[in-house]
């Protein structure tokens, strides 16, 4: 079983300047670094350059975003959540998305896609499975810090 926490770190976005980013930390590794190691050599594909989602956007998505409860226009009709965003700072630009599968016992991120490049294979990124209580506590902790 994987563990998760959500870091709030300063990030320099092309469109927004320096502001806080939400970065998932999975079993001690920042997801940004895991993605960069796997895909950083794919210049022009935006596969290895995603960064955390701006904290302001996560707040705008509403409570429970990381539990799939957002009513925001970007997510209300999707069964996915964005976990990383483009370096420009817009979540709808080059977003790394995962389906969110929530049960009473686990929260799973079973696969990853980038809607702007649907042919990219993120299979090497893996599948992540979190114990529900630990995941929900991490989401609550993030929301309290936002």
Image (spheres, helix red, strand yellow):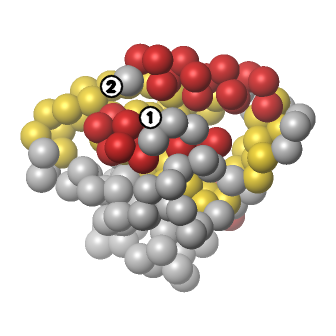
In the image, residue 4 sits, relative to residue 64, either above or below, namely: above
User: Disc 2 on helix, strand or loop?
Assistant: strand
Image spot of residue 127 (x, y percent):
74, 51
At a point 54% along the width and 18% down the height, the residue shown is 141
Q: Is residue 95 above or below residue 30?
A: below
Residue 37 percent across, percent down from the top left: 48, 47
Residue 6 appears anywhere in the view: yes
Q: Position of residue 49 (x, y in %)?
A: 34, 54
Q: Position of residue 11 (x, y in %)?
A: 24, 34
Q: Which residue is mark 1?
A: 23
Residue 5 lies in quadrant: top right
Decide which of 119, 137 is in the foreground and name it: 137
Image quarter (top left, top right, bottom left or bottom right) of the C terminus: top left
Residue 98 appears left or right of 35: right
**What residue does disc 2 label?**
9
Q: Answer whether labels 1 and 2 touch (C-beta < 8 Å).
A: yes
**Is residue 73 positioned above or below 45 on the image?**
above
State the quadrant of the N terminus.
top right
Between the residue at mark 1 and the residue at mark 2, the CA separation in whole angstroms equals 7 Å
Nearer to us in this view, 92 or 128: 92
Residue placed at 14% from the left, 34% from the top?
Answer: 18
């Amino acid at each position: 079983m994987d563990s998760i926490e959500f870091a709030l770190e300063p990030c320099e976005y092309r469109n927004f300047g320096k502001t806080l980013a939400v970065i998932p930390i999975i079993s001690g590794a920042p997801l940004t670094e895991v993605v960069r190691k796997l895909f950083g050599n794919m210049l022009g594909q935006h596969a290895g350059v995603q960064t955390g989602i701006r904290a302001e956007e996560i707040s705008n998505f509403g409570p429970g975003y990381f539990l799939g409860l957002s009513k925001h226009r970007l997510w209300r009709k999707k069964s996915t959540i964005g976990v990383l965003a483009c370096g420009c700072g817009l979540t709808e630009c080059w977003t790394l998305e995962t389906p969110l599968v929530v049960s009473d016992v686990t929260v799973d991120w079973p696969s990853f896609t980038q809607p702007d490049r649907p042919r990219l294979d993120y299979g090497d990124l893996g599948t992540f499975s979190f114990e529900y209580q630990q995941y929900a506590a991490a989401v609550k902790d993030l929301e309290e810090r936002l």
